[in-house]
Image (tube, rainbow, N blue to C red):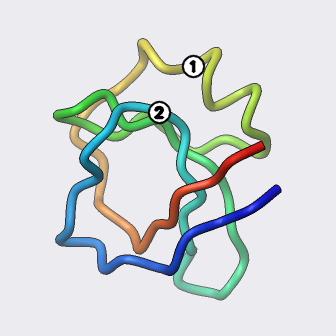
Amino acid sequence: MSVTQWFLADVCPEHTGVYEVKMDYGSTLFRYWDGFFWSSLATSVDSAYLNRYIATKYRALPWRGIAI
């Protein structure tokens, strides 16, 4: 899996898709960005994609793009 640099939470991704997010305590999880809102947190890329329709206005977190 290749990844991009980390972006600040107030910067929104340009494309829809699954992104890795950095938690306050240092670990990482995954979220789907639908172009307007982030989905809930997920433990894998697949589960973030499957839960993509459960997007709502969750608190933004630092994120980076991933390519599998």
Asked which quadrant contains residue 8, the reply is bottom left
Q: Is residue 35 left or right of residue 66?
A: left
Q: Looking at the picture, how far across and down is residue 27, in whole percent?
A: 72, 77
Residue drawn where x is 54% and y is 63% of the image: 21
Q: Looking at the picture, how far across and down is residue 39, in whole percent?
A: 42, 34
Q: CA distance from mark 2 to mark 1?
A: 11 Å
Q: Looking at the picture, how far across and down is residue 62, in whole percent?
A: 41, 74
Looking at the figure, which quarter contains the C terminus?
Answer: top right
Q: Which mark is residue 40?
A: none
Q: Is residue 27 left or right of residue 48?
A: right
At mark 1, the secondary structure is loop
Q: Which mark is residue 51?
A: 1
Density class for disc 2 (Cα within 10 Å; few <14, some 14-19, many ≥20) is some
Asked which quadrant contains residue 29, the reply is bottom right
Q: Amino acid at mark 1?
A: Asn
Density class for disc 1 (Cα within 10 Å; few <14, some 14-19, many ≥20) is some
- Residue 57 higher or lower than 4, as above or below: above
Q: Amino acid at mark 2?
A: Gly
Q: Earlier in the sequence, mark 2 or mark 1?
A: 2
Residue drawn where x is 56% and y is 74% of the image: 22
| Foreground residue among 64 and 59 | 64
Residue drawn where x is 55% and y is 39% of the image: 18
Q: Is residue 50 left or right of residue 37?
A: right
Disc 2 + disc 1, Cβ < 8 Å: no
At mark 2, the secondary structure is strand
Residue drawn where x is 24% and y is 46% of the image: 14
Residue highlighted by disc 2: 17
> How many marks on residues?
2
